[in-house]
């Protein structure tokens, strides 16, 4: 139920009327001093501005959900994945604060991953 609330809030958010964000499969997530780093699929041109992060604050802990606002239709030799960093401040979280991730986790198909 919490996931549905977060998704509904994301869709009702600032996305344009013609673009509905899609829940992004995550290849990996790392939590460090700088914040939360997510690894997502990329054709070589994915930027942080192509994604949006929704943060649900319902107890017992915050729920993060990454969604793609703009598809990466680029044709590049750097295809594979992109890493995007969100600071704790951006997420409204304290360093060390437990959270959950609502996105599906999948194996990175990139060579050498």
Image (cartoon, rainbow, N blue to C red):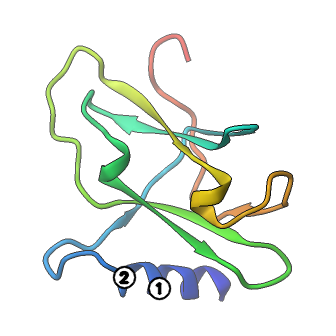
Give residue 104's position: percent from left, percent from top: 58, 56
Give residue 29's position: percent from left, percent from top: 65, 41
In the rendered structure, find residue 9 and report the number of the disc placed on it: 1
Marks 1 and 2: CB-CB under 8 Å?
Answer: yes
Residue positioned most to the front = 89
Left or right: 54 in relation to 97? left
Residue at 73% from the left image edge and 72% from the top image edge: 62
Of residues 88 and 59, the one nearer the viewer is 88
Give residue 67's position: percent from left, percent from top: 42, 61
Instruction: Please give the count of numbered marks on the rendered protein.
Output: 2
Query: Which quadrant holds the N terminus?
Result: bottom right
Question: Which residue is under mark 2?
Answer: 13
Of residues 17 and 73, the one nearer the viewer is 17
Left or right: 29 in relation to 94? left
The image shows residue 97, relative to residue 85, as above or below, that is below
Residue at 56% from the left image edge and 88% from the top image edge: 5
> Secondary structure under badge 2?
loop
Give residue 3's position: percent from left, percent from top: 61, 79
Residue positioned most to the top = 112
- The answer for how far apart the CA atoms under marks 1 and 2 are is 6 Å
Other residues around mark 1 within 10 Å, as few (<14) / some (14–19) / many (≥20): some
In the rendered structure, find residue 19 and report the number of the disc placed on it: none
Left or right: 103 in relation to 10? right
The image shows residue 48, relative to residue 44, as above or below, that is below
> Secondary structure under badge 1?
helix
Of residues 67 and 37, the one nearer the viewer is 37
Left or right: 21 in relation to 100? left
Residue at 56% from the left image edge and 18% from the top image edge: 113
Residue at 30% from the left image edge and 38% from the top image edge: 46
Other residues around mark 2 within 10 Å, as few (<14) / some (14–19) / many (≥20): few
């Amino acid at each position: 139920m919490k996931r549905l609330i977060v998704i509904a809030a994301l869709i009702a958010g600032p996305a344009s009327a013609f673009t509905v964000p899609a829940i992004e499969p995550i290849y990996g997530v790392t939590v460090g001093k700088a914040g939360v780093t997510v690894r997502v699929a990329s054709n070589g041109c994915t930027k942080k501005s192509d994604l949006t992060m929704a943060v649900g604050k319902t107890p017992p802990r915050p729920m993060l959900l990454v969604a793609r606002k703009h598809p990466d239709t680029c044709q590049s030799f750097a295809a594979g994945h992109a890493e995007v960093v969100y600071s704790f401040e951006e997420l409204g979280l304290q360093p060390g604060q437990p959270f959950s991730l609502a996105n599906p986790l999948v194996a990175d198909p990139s060579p050498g991953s």
